[in-house]
Image (cartoon, rainbow, N blue to C red):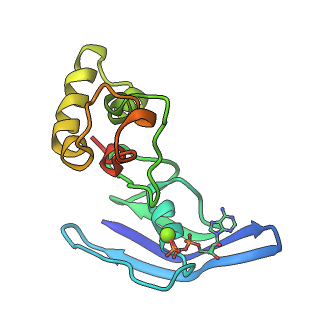
Amino acid sequence: MIQLDGVGQVFDGREGQVTALEKIDLHVRDGEFVTLIGRSGCGKSTLLRLIAGLISPTSGSVQVAGEPVTGPRRDVSFMFQRPALLPWRSVLSNVMLPVEIDGGAGDRRESRGRAAYRRSGRAAGRCRSDRSLRRARGGPPRAGSLPG
Ligand SMILES: Nc1ncnc2c1ncn2[C@@H]1O[C@H](COP(=O)(O)OP(=O)(O)OP(=O)(O)O)[C@@H](O)[C@H]1O
Ligand SMILES: [Mg+2]
């Protein structure tokens, strides 16, 4: 369950304050599939960042699974609009990064990373998992940023 009540988000932009969201109420029930559609700059990514706990609302409240969102949660995955990958790392170690941050058991990290790579990175990138992204042919595979 995702619940936003009276959510507003104001950013301090270079040319003054930007109101990205104002008085947003959104209730998503378990199992519902929701798509956000709107013109560029209308606040779609801002809304997703709030739900993922990457930013806090200026006003109103955001809840996931009945709890106020106070930071990133392990049960919420977020795929960035642009790939958030580290070019000096190999394809596989980019895939493993979330597992590292998560503090997953060291001996299981690589097998989890390889399984995630098989599911996503290889199909999209067609490059060897031990290649650094900088050297991967055809540019970084977007799927490398998919949560494992
Ligand atoms: N960190 C920030 N600082 C200042 N302004 C911001 C910040 N993040 C977003 N904005 C502004 O808030 C508004 C909403 O931005 P947002 O990225 O949520 O739009 P969007 O609907 O995802 O757009 P797009 O379809 O182009 O991805 C825009 O005017 C944007 O410039
Ligand atoms: Mg966006």
The percent position of residue 72, horizontal first and vertical second, equals: 46, 47
* Residue 97 locus on image (x, y percent): 39, 32
Taking the image as shown, residue 21 lies to the left or right of residue 30, namely right
Relative horizontal placement of residue 146, taking residue 89 as reference (left or right): left
Which quarter of the figure has residue 3? bottom left
Nearer to us in this view, 130 or 17: 130
**37 versus 78 height, above or below:** below
Q: What residue sits 48% from the left and 36% below the top?
A: 87
Q: In this view, does 66 lie to the left or right of 32?
A: right
Residue 48 lies, in percent from the top left, at: 45, 65
Q: Looking at the image, which residue is at 21% across and 38% down?
A: 116
**Considering the image in quadrants, where does the N terminus appear?**
bottom left
Q: How many numbered discs, if any? A: 0
Single out the residue that lies furthest toward the top: 107
Quarter residue 23 falls in? bottom right
Q: Residue furthest front?
A: 137
Residue 14 in the image, given as x and y percentages of width and height: 81, 67
